[in-house]
Image (spheres, rainbow, N blue to C red):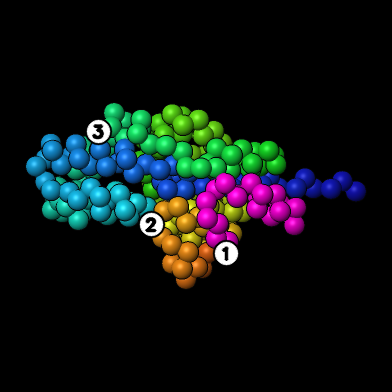
Amino acid sequence: MDLMPSPTLTVGFDLDMTLIDSRPGIKVAYERLAAETGVYIDTDLVVSRLGPPLQDEMRNWFPADAVEAACDRYRALYPDTAITPTTALPGAREAVQAVQALGGRAMVVTAKYEPNAKLHLAHLGIDADVLIGGLWAEGKAQALLEHGARVYVGDHTGDVRGAHAADALSVAVTTGPCDEEELRAAGADVILPDLTVFPAWLRTFAAA
């Protein structure tokens, strides 16, 4: 009797503060937006809490009827201000490659505007198989389920919720705004200090 082929291992990754340190570039983009609009923005505070959708952050600085325009302008400023200063976090490329080395597919699911997320991946040479932007927290489950992701890796409690909503294993890294205690309380299944230890963990997981 023929055996059914085993399903491809698909692993999802968050982007900001999971794969990339976008704080320097985002800070510059917000500074440019503040200069253009004359609106005060505490850019250090902004970059200390990356993760949620852009609109959520803009509501802290702009009146409700100006939020969408501020978001549009920020996204337009982003390519020229935020891409070059951003760096890959330690182990990011190797984590994606570790999935592919096992014959799997690595996908990036992020709340970031997808065209700008694509620029980050291209600039830093992070060769994900799939990129889906504009999804946050439980909303990420839509993409994870569609692509059959068994694991989702992120740095925020919202990423933990997204993984669980997709019935995927939540792997959390403590490279973002949420510490180990917060991630554990949110229900993360695995907590790693960063992505440098992810390939070894993944090989053990895949062999189980």
Q: Amino acid at mark 2?
A: Pro
137 within the magenta span: no
Residue at 19 percent of width and 51 percent of height: 42
- Is residue 130 visible in this depiction of the protein? yes
What is the span of residues highlighted in magenta in the rendered image?
189-208
The label shown at residue 50 is: none
Image position, residue 2 (x, y; %): 87, 46
Q: Main secondary structure of the magenta part?
A: helix
- Is residue 55 visible in this depiction of the protein? no
Residue, far right: 1
Q: Residues within 10 Å of mark 3 (few under 14, many from 20)?
A: some
Please, what secondary structure does the residue beneath circle 2 have?
loop
Give the CA separation, mark 3 to mark 1. Answer: 37 Å
Asked whether, in this view, residue 200 is left or right of residue 141, the answer is right
Mark 1, residue position: 189
Q: Nearer the viewer, residue 208 or 141?
A: 208
Mark 2, residue position: 177
Give the CA separation, mark 2 to mark 1. Answer: 18 Å
